[in-house]
Image (tube, coloured by chain):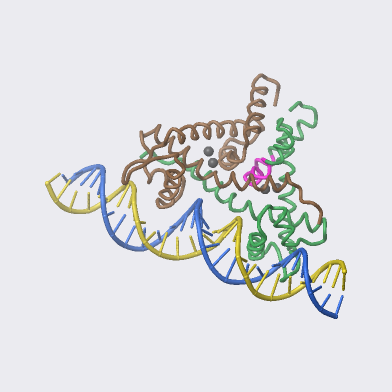
Chain colours: A green, B brown, C blue, D yellow
Amino acid sequence: MSETDPTQIKGFNRARERAARALLEDYVEMISDLAAEFGEARITEIAARLGVAHPTATKAVSRLKREGLAVSRPYRGVFLTEAGEALAESVRARHRTVVALLLAIGVPEEVAELDAEGIEHHVSRRTLEAFEAYLARSERGEKG
Amino acid sequence: MSETDPTQIKGFNRARERAARALLEDYVEMISDLAAEFGEARITEIAARLGVAHPTATKAVSRLKREGLAVSRPYRGVFLTEAGEALAESVRARHRTVVALLLAIGVPEEVAELDAEGIEHHVSRRTLEAFEAYLARSERGEKG
DNA sequence: CCAAATTTGTAGCCGAGGCTACATTTCGCA
DNA sequence: TGCGAAATGTAGCCTCGGCTACAAATTTGG
Ligand SMILES: [Mn+2]
Ligand SMILES: [Mn+2]
Ligand SMILES: [Mn+2]
Ligand SMILES: [Mn+2]
């Protein structure tokens, strides 16, 4: 058997790890959005906005709590810890950059928003930096 | 409660659906690669290249068979159906386009290959078309 | 202020996708 | 040709992330 390509295996493993973190990232970002809008994030509202049943959101929040990203008390709202808020901020920034990049490439706005919701979780720091550099260049008129 | 944004919900739902198909797509592409290289895809080799234990690959292949994408007999190789081979071809093409786009944007080669393994599964047809159009433009020297 | 509506919690089901341990079959070669 | 090694199958375990059904708490308004 020909030797297996280590870069390829690494790619699959990284994709799996990132897919596992994707849900968690979306919840954290959503909770942060709701906190900004209403002062707190309620389970029902989190579930509604993510398009899942409320027990699904409850379970996800308990995973967030286990990871030290959120806190909550029974029948009360969910709040992010400092770590959670920091994660939310970076996730939000990355989301914006991915959408901007897609738009700059020529992806229609509605499609860009939809695709970004999945793509964002697989964009590494290095790739994000490349996106930002590209956007900076094209804004300076170097014609995207 | 302010009305929930339907586009956002749609984005989350689509991201979930695509994440669920991602594994299946990678298996099909891998089986196709191995068929081209060795004439058949063996469970052990599939597992090794995807970086998983062999029973994990076995279970995935039975899902592929259930979906009508592959066929196999006990202790023999795995083969794609016509539908499976068609899927493999489109997955492979999309993978190449995503890598090319990342490189054109300025992502380092190694990083591009790693990130593409996850990103590819969330690129819709419309976005793929935009990528192709962009690549065609920049190849014609319009300076990306 | 109390009853109804709403929200939240909890139990329990499912399939996907990981794993280890072990059984069985096939293959390669001495 | 037969035996040991390698490949494959199978059983059974786990977590995650969906769901429904139902119980309990909270909020609301008449
Ligand atoms: Mn997302
Ligand atoms: Mn997002
Ligand atoms: Mn992939
Ligand atoms: Mn791929």
Q: Nearer the viewer, residue A30 or B62?
A: B62
Quadrant of the rendering where the N terminus of chain B is positioned:
bottom right
Toward which corner of the image does residue A105 lie, by quadrant?
top right
In percent of the image, x 36 and y 34: which residue is there?
B38
C16 vs A28, nearest the viewer: C16
Q: How many marks?
A: 0
Q: In screen coordinates, is A40 left or right of B29?
A: right
Magenta segment includes A68: no
Camera-side residue of D23 and C3: C3
Q: Position of residue A54 (x, y in %)?
A: 67, 60
Residue at the location (71% across, 60% down)? A83
Q: Quadrant of residue A108?
A: top right
Q: Quadrant of the C terminus of chain B?
A: top right
Task: Find residue B25 and report its horizontal and vertical position in percent.
Answer: 51, 40
Residue depicted at x 49% and y 34% = B88
Which quadrant would residue A55 be assigned to in this image? bottom right
Magenta residues (range): A115-129
In percent of width and height, residue A61 lies at 67, 62
Q: Please say whether residue A120 is one of the residues in the magenta stretch.
A: yes
Mainly helix, strand or loop, the magenta region? Answer: helix
- For this orientation, the residue located farthest to the top is B140
